[in-house]
Image: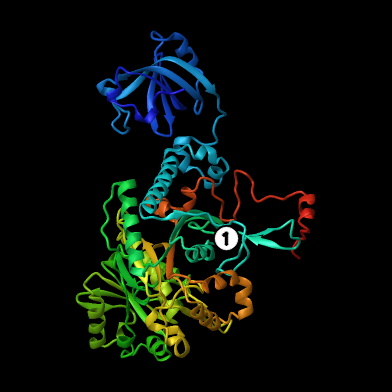
Amino acid sequence: MRSDHCGEITKNDIGKEVKLNGWVTSVRDHGGVIFIDLRDRTGIVQVVFKPEVAQECHDIAEDFRSEFVIAIKGEVIPRTDDMINPKIPTGEVEVLVKEVKLLNQSLTPPFVISEAQNAGEEIRLKYRYLDLRHPQMQSNMIMRHKIAHTVRNFLEENKFIEIETPILNKSTPEGARDFLVPSRINEGMFYALPQSPQIFKQILMVSGFERYYQIVKCFRDEDLRADRQPEFTQIDLELSFITRDSLITLMEDMFQLILKECYNIDIKTPFERIDYQVAMNRYGNDRPDTRFDLHIEDVGDIVKKSDFKVFQSVVEGGGKVCGINAKKGEQLSRKDIDDLTAFVGQFGAKGMAWMRVKGGKLESNIVKFFNDDVQKELMDKFQAEDGDLLLFGAGDESIVLDSLGNLRIELAKRLGLIDENQLAFNWVIDFPLFHYDKQEDRYDSVHHPFTAPEPDDLHLLEEDPLSMRSEGYDLVLNGVELGGGSIRIHDYKVQQKIFRHLKISEEEAEEKFGFLLTALKYGAPPHGGIAFGLDRIVMLLQKATSIREVIAFPKTQKGVCLMSGAPSHVEEDQLMDLSIKVEEKS
């Protein structure tokens, strides 16, 4: 039905007869000559209907409206100099129509396709098939395909084997709620949709495949936000006979190829590696955005020498006093500071102290409690200059770091410090192996219970487990975690010791992970892996604001598909087949 695509017609095709198919984007009648912008997924080309060339075609075109589907046959001709459109690849040519056929009509769309992204998200999701016609949405989907294709080619070149793992599996604890699927055949029993292929990919290493991957759907029944969906896509990898450093290098090569092949961008490797504790202390979180400075500084040792009772009592009570130097923050008014104080309150901070730097000295309503020597130490610590604004948080360590970590990002936005074209990759390494859950009075894994401890720290398991580091690692881009992984425990005896510290009994371990634990007894090789969120990767590289912009048919923050109406009620007999009765919560 076609010889060419609309967006690929150029001046090199002048004089050529072409057959094109597509959607009518706009219709313009200029004194009897009708101009139509014809669109397919490759772009737009202008087609022209002249009555003196083909009267019948011209008459048919008079009835064309937006989003009608048509087929045309005509000659590619040059545009006159005053009609050239340099904004589009086809802007130097047009197609003089000699034959036309209406393939289908369209109702008037609920929004103009070219302006779809200005429409409300609800209506866009309800009419997703129309929203996906927008050039930006098509670009997002095409680039998603190209990125996945590049990943597959890279992994094929590096001797990975694509293997599918089960979608219906047993429920295992992985940090979020499982989606459960009732079994009709096994009455009263349930499958769980996989949160990740973690156990199966380790089994594949025991099976001797050495290098596995799949681009796979995963499912988590958790509260949603802009970068979360109940179903999401992972680039999932596992390798045998691998070290952390060699795995990291291989993944850097993969991202270098993605940026080059898909965006023609050269990125330098190796990426920066940041120790977990350094990330927390300097950036306030374990996914640091390194496109700008605004580092968090611990000033407890300095301010305890002041007469400011608030800071003194926090330090004496074992808390933290930290601050950020908002370089050139003089542009922030007192109202701005009040707004920022309310902002950090969202993260548990009870207040925020501040000092301006002016004339080589500090100014604020609390400066009188800081003698000249303390003021000088503070200015030296922050490398403060005239025009800077120092902002302080005090209290529990986790609250201080979380609030200031979010504050530095908010400040960077307000002060225009973020280069939106920069790609700042970094690895966060040396995570702690455990954290302590006070409510449950037990240790929990920071990643998951199969994460290997740093070999040099294994002796700390009995005497100081919270000081143990793991062989885990996360890849971060512009403050967003792209994925994470670890070297795994391959020694059954070590795995048993870790389970004991997590208060997972032998019976519980056997019930939840028995087939993996048994497999580890049969010559499991050293192995490790990583999983990347494909949706997040595409979102960041396409500069989208939400992963819903890069998923063809996403769900809302309430987990609803507005187009299809899922989830929905089912017939009573379907529930009876599953031995399920639905009762409303009281």
User: Looking at the image, is 152 positioned above or below residue 87?
Assistant: below
Residue 452, x across and y down, in percent: 44, 75
Q: State left or right for residue 51 relative to residue 386.
A: right
Please give the name of the residue rendered at 41% of the width and 47% of the height, measured from the top-left corner. Answer: 149
Q: Secondary structure at mark 1?
A: loop
> The residue under label 1 is which amino acid type?
Pro
Residue 223 shows in this picture: yes
Question: Where 349 falls versus 528 (above or below)?
Answer: below
Q: Quadrant of residue 312?
A: bottom left
Residue 327: percent from left, percent from top: 27, 68
Q: Is residue 47 above or below residue 448?
A: above
Would residue 426 be seen by someone viewing this image from the given angle? no
Bin the neighbour count of mark 1 within 10 Å (Cα to Cα): few under 14, some 14-19, many 20 and up. Answer: many
11 or 523, nearer to the observer: 523
Q: Quadrant of the C terminus?
A: bottom right
Q: Residue at x 56, y 57 (%)?
A: 230
* Above or below for 577 versus 6: below
User: Which residue is disc 1 drawn over?
Assistant: 194
Give the x, y percent position of residue 260. Answer: 30, 49
